[in-house]
Structure formats: C-alpha cells, structure tokens
Amino acid sequence: MDQVDRILDQWHRERPDLDVVPMGMFGRLKRLVTHLSAHLDRVFEAQGLNAASFDVLATLRRSGPPYALSPSVLIEWTMVTSGTMTNRIDRLERAGLVSRSPDPRDGRGSVVALTDEGFTLIDALIGEHVENQHRLIEGLDKAESAELDRLLAKWLACFEPERAIEDGDETMNARHRGRPTSA
C-alpha cells in the first residue's frame, strides 16, 4: 500500500459516494513526475544544464544538419512562450552553446544554431540521458513498458488529437511548417 492508497482509503471512508479512481491515477502521476524529474535533472545538472536548456539543445541536435532553427520553430517544438524561449536562448548563448544569426531566408528573423561546444555537449549528454531513462523504467518489463507507452499515447491524443497523426518518414526539417509529433 502506498501513500496514494492511504489517501483513497480516507476518501472512501469519508465520501463512499465518490469514485476516486481518477484521483489515484492523478496522485500517482504527480508523485512519479516529481521522482522522475529529480532523477532526470541530476544528469542535466552534472553538465551545468537544466531541463529547459537540455530541451533546446536536444531539439537543435535532433533537427539534423545544420543544427539550426528559428526561435519560432523552437517554441513550437518545446511548447513554451516566446519570452521563455528568449531567456533560454540568451542563457545558452552566454554559455557558448548556441549562436544567433540573421535568418538568410528572412532578414527580419534569426536562426539559433548549436556551436561546436554545444554540439559536443548535447551529443554526449543525450547518451547519458537515454541510459538514465532506461534505468528509470527498470521496474517495468518490456511488455509493461510498451503497454504503458501505448496507453499514455492514447490518453495524450485526447488532448492533442492533431499530434496523434503519424507523419511517416518525414524529417524534422520538413515538419517545421507543421506540428510536432514526438517528445
């Protein structure tokens, strides 16, 4: 019995008329996010990053050569506000991990690119990150992991139905006009 079970037992005793099954799911999800975030953050912090800066660097790295995107595309992929993205880019630029230059296709805009230092850092860190993620799901076997992933994708599609559509073998660069489909 975990803490969530104890909370649910209290509600069953006090309000037996309520179906608190969703409360248990949300409670466990919230507690899992707290634990998982702490473990993920340790890997980022060891390299002087946080989850937000990792997200920007990883988005640039997985975009493929030339590892450069406009701020608006970064916003679309990371799902943050423009002010938040500006702060992230500023911090990463000061750290020498990204550079900003005028967009050659549109002089009014800019392009954010990984520097050599940023590329080296994210290329090494993504391996550590994936290993860490594997460690964090060790409590589930392969079938359970696959089933949980399937159920989470189904649930997420209730909120993001346009993102649930498969986009085949298109590359990230080709999708800049569309919506992101992966985390």
Image (tube, rainbow, N blue to C red):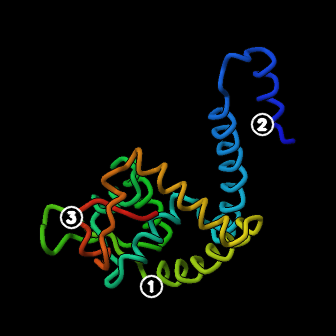
- Please tell me which residue is depicted at 66% across the width and 42% down the height of the picture: 30
Ranked by sequence position, the earlier of labels 3 and 1 is: 1
Nearer to us of marks 3 and 1 is 3
- Please tell me which residue is depicted at 53% across the width and 66% down the height of the picture: 54
Residue 27 position within the rendered picture, expressed as x and y whole percent measured from the top left: 68, 38
- Please tell me which residue is depicted at 69% across the width and 56% down the height of the picture: 36
Q: Are marks 1 and 2 in contact (CB under 8 Å)?
A: no
Residue 92 position within the rendered picture, expressed as x and y whole percent measured from the top left: 46, 65
Task: Identify which amino acid the numbered label 1 is placed on.
Answer: Asp
Structural distance between the alpha carbons of marks 3 and 1: 27 Å
Where is mark 3, residue-wise? 177
Q: Is residue 46 above or below residue 88?
A: below
Where is mark 2, residue-wise? 4
Structural distance between the alpha carbons of marks 3 and 2: 43 Å
Residue 82 position within the rendered picture, expressed as x and y whole percent measured from the top left: 33, 49
Is disc 1 placed on a helix, strand or loop? helix
Ranked by sequence position, the earlier of labels 3 and 2 is: 2
Q: Which mark is residue 144?
A: none
Where is mark 1, residue-wise? 116
Task: Identify which amino acid the numbered label 2 is placed on.
Answer: Val
Structural distance between the alpha carbons of marks 1 and 2: 47 Å
**How packed is label 3: few (under 14 Cα within 10 Å), some, or many (20 or more)?**
few
Is disc 2 placed on a helix, strand or loop? helix
Residue 98 position within the rendered picture, expressed as x and y whole percent measured from the top left: 41, 72
Q: Which of 10/19 is in front?
A: 19
Q: Is residue 22 above or below residue 168?
A: above
Task: Identify which amino acid the numbered label 3 is placed on.
Answer: Arg
Q: Are marks 3 and 1 in contact (CB under 8 Å)?
A: no
Nearer to us of marks 1 and 2 is 2
Q: Is residue 76 above or below residue 122?
A: above
